Structures are given as structure tokens and as C-alpha cells.
Amino acid sequence: MKVDNVSVASKMLHGAFILTLATVLSKLIGTLQKIPLQNMGGDIVFGIYNTVYPFYLLVITLAIAGFPIAISKFVAENGAAGNDKENRRILRISSLFIGLLGIVLGLCTYVGAPLIASWIDNDHVVSAIRYVSIAFLFIPVMSLLRGFFQGHQNMVPTAVSQIVEQSVRVTVMILLLLYLTSRQAGPEDIAAGALFGSAAGGAAGLLVMLLYWRRYRTNVNREVGLKDASTRCEIATASEAIATIDRVGVCVSQESSWMLLRKIVVYAIPICLASLALPLMNLVDTFTVPRLLKVGGIGDSGAMIQFGIYNRGMPLVQLITMLATSLSVLFIPALAEARFKRDNLLIQNQCRLSLRWFWLMGLAASIGLCVLAEPINVMLYQDATGTDTIRWIAFTAAFSSIGLISAALLQGIGIVKAPAVNLLVGALAKTLLNLWLVPKFGITGAAIAFVAAQLLAAALNVALLVRSTGLRLRAGALLAKPALILAGLASAAAGAQWAAAAVLSALGMRAGRMVAVVESLCGVTAGAIAFVILVALTKLIREEELRMLPKVGSGLAKLLQKLRVLR
């Protein structure tokens, strides 16, 4: 039994590792595509895109986010019982439901595009909303198939489809950008073409999953033939039948399709709600910031330009939160196992370690982006417009990272609904702060509101986690040592940027994009080196804590021991 458990754990970690790498790569592709979008289309196209995309992301999250996880759970349970027939029934019923839901959402979004545009108070977004609605036909079913294979501990189909989906989405977007800009199309048409890439990517991802499903079905039919759970019940002895009935409860009576679907939906909904962190905050901006900017009399086009500038820092922050989301996968299995064993001390240690790592990484990214905001802005977007806004946006990385990991930890100990409620509180705070700050400070006010709302949601999650687990957080580990490390990081990054600028100026190079590239790279490199050295010198991470990291902890500990920077 021990060998089996080790084998299962190894398989789970291997699958998590594959899925994490694929998620990082696909999200990296998806996030960085916004840079050529702004460069080629301009700030008004960028503004229209970032007005519509959060709405699309919210609807997709509400519709499907929890269903792959729910399907994987039920498939895994039936797979352990050898009941492949029930798994096919689950996939058939849920695919029909989610496919119809996607069609309904797509039609409602397409037909209701003018109404949604009136809610946003901007007519420029109608075409973009209609083009992005096509994606609802493909993405829901694709996500269900991903969940089916994840339930079989096979992460490769999901990984391949994620990379194909994002690659096709970005390729189609860039090709349409080149074509439409060469034809001197209007900003509305260019933004709509860019958003059509989401539909093309969804179709490609679904095609990949259907090919994997066809191969799976062929293999199962070849190996199993007509044997299924009901046939095994008929030929089993009485004692075997009783054991099977007690174990899976499917041989004598089978749940109705409606009851099975209801069970899946009830399980999926809390997961969907807890996945809305950034989409909901971004949607608040979509429905409030352009409208509030127009109060100053800048008109629809001016509001879209300002909103595009406001969103310049978002791709970089999303890279950080994407990394936080992916890395959380490494911690959750250990936490679930500790909860199963009722080992409260292990739960506390895992929570403390997770919070400390994510807090430190999020703060380091925030400080680095804040210090290097100007050269990074010029490097990515060709000018320094909106640099102060990017500096404020940078700090959402720290608080959103803590919000994401604390929500995952709460879910790991069985508290599923509270993170969603805390998120709604944060979204309400974002709305109220936008109404107060945007008329006074413009897009910088929206950025300040974003930071405050993320801080509030994260603080509520952490407070509940502390209360539920009895966790004690040391101020020195969370504030004092990180402050020293971050001061060193900021000094190194700023010093390297200044030195690079001085050298390039002495060489006769004028300020511009290439100079900004050199300044940014030198600053990021110096900051990263200073961060690693100071973490080691302050002994912020101990050997036993480092070894607690699944998959990579032991290797990192041995490496740092050889370098004599780990006690």
C-alpha cells in the first residue's frame, strides 16, 4: 500500500509540474500579446480591448471555471472504482449542459452587445463584444474535456491544448492587426479583430481536446471492449456484488441524469465564484473608469485612450499573479493531506510558509516594477505616458499574490465560500473608491483604488486563515527582514539603471526605446541578484522550510548548501 501511495503522489506531483509549466508558458504568451497590440494599434485600440476583455473573462469564469475541477473529481472517483461507463455518462451530460450554456451566453452577448455598450457608456466596444462572443461556442466544452483527462491524472492533453489555444489566439490577433492596420481600419474594427483571436484560440484548443478524446475512446474500446460496471455486477458473486455496491453504489441503482448534473453544478459554483479575483476587479474598472473619465469632457475616444494607458501595467502584474496561481498548486496537495491526517501543526507550517513566500515574491516584484516603471514603460509602449499610474498598479502584485494563495489555502482546509465573499467586499470597495478617486485623480485614482481593494480582500482572507488554523505570524519574518531585503533590491535596481543611463549617455546614445531596454534589463538583473543574496544573508528561508517545497525543495536546499548560503 505504501508503494501505491508513493506512486500516486509521484504521479500527482508529475502532473502538477507539467500543468504548471504549461500554464506558465500559455499565460506568458497570452499576457505578452498585449504589448504588440498597444504598439501596433495604439492606446485607443488598447483601451477598447481592455474594456471588453474583462467582461469576456468574467462570463467565461462564471460559466466554466469550476466545471473542469468538478468533472475531474467525479471522474477520479469513478476511475478508482473501475467505472468507465459512468465517467462517459458524466462527460456526456455535463457537455450537453455546458455546451448549451455556451450557446446561450454567446447569443445573448452577440444580440445584447449594444445594451452592454450602453452600460459601459461607450459605443466603440459594440463590434468587439460581438466578435468575442463567438468564443463561447468552443471554450466551455474544451474546458470540460480538460477536466475529464485531469480526473484520469493525465495532464498532457490540458497542457498541449493550453499552449495551442494561446499560440493560435496570439497568432490570429497579430495577423489581423497587421492586415487591418495596413487597410487603415478604424480602432473599433482593429480591437474587434484582436478579440476574434480568442474565438480562434478556443476553436483550436477544442480541436486538440477532441483528438485526445478520440484516441482515449479508441484505446478504451480496444482494451475493455463491452465490459462495463453493469456487466461486472451480473457476473460477480454475491459477496463481490455487495462489496461493489457498498463501494460505489452504481451497480444496483444509478443516479438520474438530473441529480448527477445538480451534484456537479453545486460542487462547481463555489469554485467559480472563488476564481473571480482579477476578472471581477477588472470588470468594475470596465463599467466605471471610462464613464467617470468622460465626466471631465474628454469624450469616448479620449476615455478609451486614457483607459488604454491605465492598463499598460496590467500585463506585467498579471504575469506575477499568474505565477502565483501556478505555484500555489505545489502547496495545496500537502495541505489537503495534512487536513486528512488532522495534523494541525503541519497545516500551520504549510500556511505560514506559503504566505511568507508569496508575500516576499509579490513585494519584490512590486518594488522592482515601481522602481523601473519609466524605462519599462518606454521599452514596452514606446513612451513614458502613465508611468506614475504603473507605479501604483505595481503594488497590486503583492496583495493579489497574497489574496490568491490565501484563498487557495482556505479552500484546501474546506472553507470554500468565504474567499468569494471577501472578493465581493473588495469589488464593492473598488467601486466606491473609483467613484471617489477617478474624478479627482483620473487613471491614477483608479490605480490607487485597485491597490486598496486588493489589500482589503487579501487581509480578510488572511485574517480568516489565522482564525481558522490558529496560525501565528511573526512580524519580523513578514515585515522587518523583507523591508531590509526590498530596500537592497530597490537600491540595486535604481543604481544599475542610473549607471546604464550614464554609460549610454557618455557613448552618445540618445534617450529612447533601445536605451530603455538596456536600463530595464540592467535594473532587473541587479535587483534579482541583490534579492537572492539578501535572502540568503538574512537567513529568511531556513533549510527545513526550503525542503518543504514539493518537487524542487530538496534540490534547492542542496544547491544553496554547496554555495554555503543556507544554514
Image: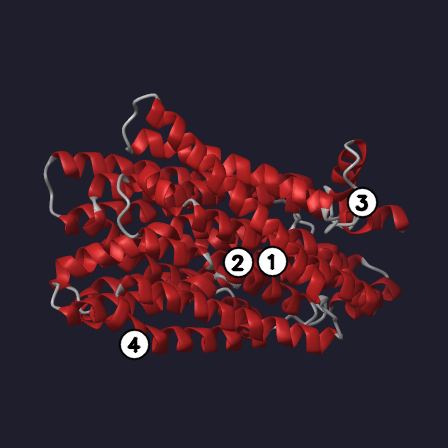
The image's colour scheme reads secondary structure
Secondary structure, mark 4, is: helix
Characterize the local packing of mark 4: few (<14), some (14-19) or many (20 or more) Cα atoms within 10 angstroms: some
Q: Nearer the viewer, residue 518 or 184?
A: 518
The answer to whether mark 1 and mark 2 are in CB contact below 8 A is: yes
Say which amino acid is labelled 3: Ser
Q: Which residue is mark 1?
A: 359
Alpha carbon of mark 3 to alpha carbon of mark 2: how far?
36 Å
The answer to whether mark 3 and mark 1 are in CB contact below 8 A is: no
Say which amino acid is labelled 1: Trp
Characterize the local packing of mark 3: few (<14), some (14-19) or many (20 or more) Cα atoms within 10 angstroms: few
Residue at horizontal 44%, vertical 52%? 317
Where residue 219 is drawn, which disc sits there? none
Comes first in the chain, label 1 or label 2: 1
List the single residue furthest toward the top: 507
Left of 225 or right of it: where is 458?
left
Q: Which residue is mark 3?
A: 7
The answer to whether mark 3 and mark 2 are in CB contact below 8 A is: no
Q: Tell me: residue 560, above or below residue 393.
A: above
Quarter-of-image position of residue 416? bottom right
Q: Which residue is mark 4?
A: 435
The answer to whether mark 4 and mark 3 are in CB contact below 8 A is: no
Left of 482 or right of it: where is 311?
left
- Give percent across and percent down for residue 528: 57, 39
Alpha carbon of mark 4 to alpha carbon of mark 2: how far?
24 Å
Q: Tell me: residue 256, above or below residue 515.
A: below
Q: Which residue is mark 2?
A: 398
